[in-house]
């Protein structure tokens, strides 16, 4: 599923797809009320989109799950904001706030794994863990 997200991000319709997402996020986050929550989700979108524009496609592929998870956080945040605003229900606002407090959205260059290093180093560590020290370039696991 994570690679499906990347196919959209880097595919033929990427400009239109990202523009539609951007418009949806910005439209939801520009209305009045819940400004702290909207600023947070809007910042996640900006950081996610900016990161994707700055990295090599190979790095995004290596971090496909992170890319997908961060986009999912943005989408969930927008949906919870829309729900909380739809009728002003205090419980929906509490659900939104509780959910936001558990999130760490926004893809960061520091998402290189627990041991740090570059994404290439992390990829090499992952390949060594799966295939051993002598890993042929381009080899993929068969699941």
Image (tube, grey):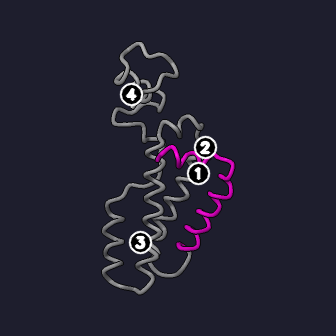
- CA distance separating discs 3 and 1: 23 Å
Dot 3 lies on which element?
helix
Provide residue 59's location: percent of width, then percent of height: 53, 36
Residue holding disc 3: 80
Q: Earlier in the sequence, mark 4 or mark 2?
A: 2
Residue holding disc 2: 54
Q: Earlier in the sequence, mark 2 or mark 3?
A: 2
| Residue 68 belongs to the span the image colors magenta | no
Dot 4 lies on which element?
helix
Dot 1 lies on which element?
helix
Check the image and report above or below for 95 versus 4.
below
Asked if marks 3 and 1 touch (Cβ < 8 Å), the reply is no
Asked if marks 4 and 2 touch (Cβ < 8 Å), the reply is no
Q: Residue at x 47, y 31 (%)?
A: 118
Dot 2 lies on which element?
helix
- CA distance separating discs 3 and 4: 35 Å
Residue holding disc 4: 126
- CA distance separating discs 1 and 4: 26 Å
| Residue 11 belongs to the span the image colors magenta | yes
Quadrant in the picture for residue 103:
bottom left
The kind of secondary structure the magenta stretch mainly shows is helix
How many marks on residues?
A: 4
Q: Earlier in the sequence, mark 3 or mark 1?
A: 1
- CA distance separating discs 1 and 2: 6 Å
Residue holding disc 1: 50
**Depth check: 16 or 31 in front?**
16
Q: Is residue 38 left or right of residue 114?
A: right
Q: Residue at x 56, y 34 (%)?
A: 58
Provide residue 128's location: percent of width, then percent of height: 38, 21
Provide residue 117's location: percent of width, then percent of height: 42, 30
Q: Give the foreground label among 2 and 3.
A: 3
Provide residue 39's location: percent of width, then percent of height: 49, 68
């Amino acid at each position: 599923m994570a690679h499906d997200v990347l196919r959209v991000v880097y595919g033929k319709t990427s400009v239109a797809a990202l523009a539609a997402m951007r418009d949806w996020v910005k439209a939801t986050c520009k209305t009045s009320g819940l400004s702290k929550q909207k600023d947070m989700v809007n910042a996640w979108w900006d950081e996610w989109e900016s990161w994707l524009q700055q990295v090599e496609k190979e790095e995004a592929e290596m971090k496909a799950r992170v890319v997908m998870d961060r986009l999912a956080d943005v989408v969930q945040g927008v949906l919870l904001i829309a729900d909380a605003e739809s009728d002003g229900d205090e419980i929906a606002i509490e659900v939104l706030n509780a959910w936001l407090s558990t999130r760490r959205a926004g893809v960061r260059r520091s998402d290189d794994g627990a041991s740090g290093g570059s994404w290439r180093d992390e990829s090499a560590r992952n390949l060594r863990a799966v295939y051993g020290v002598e890993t042929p370039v381009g080899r993929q696991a068969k699941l």
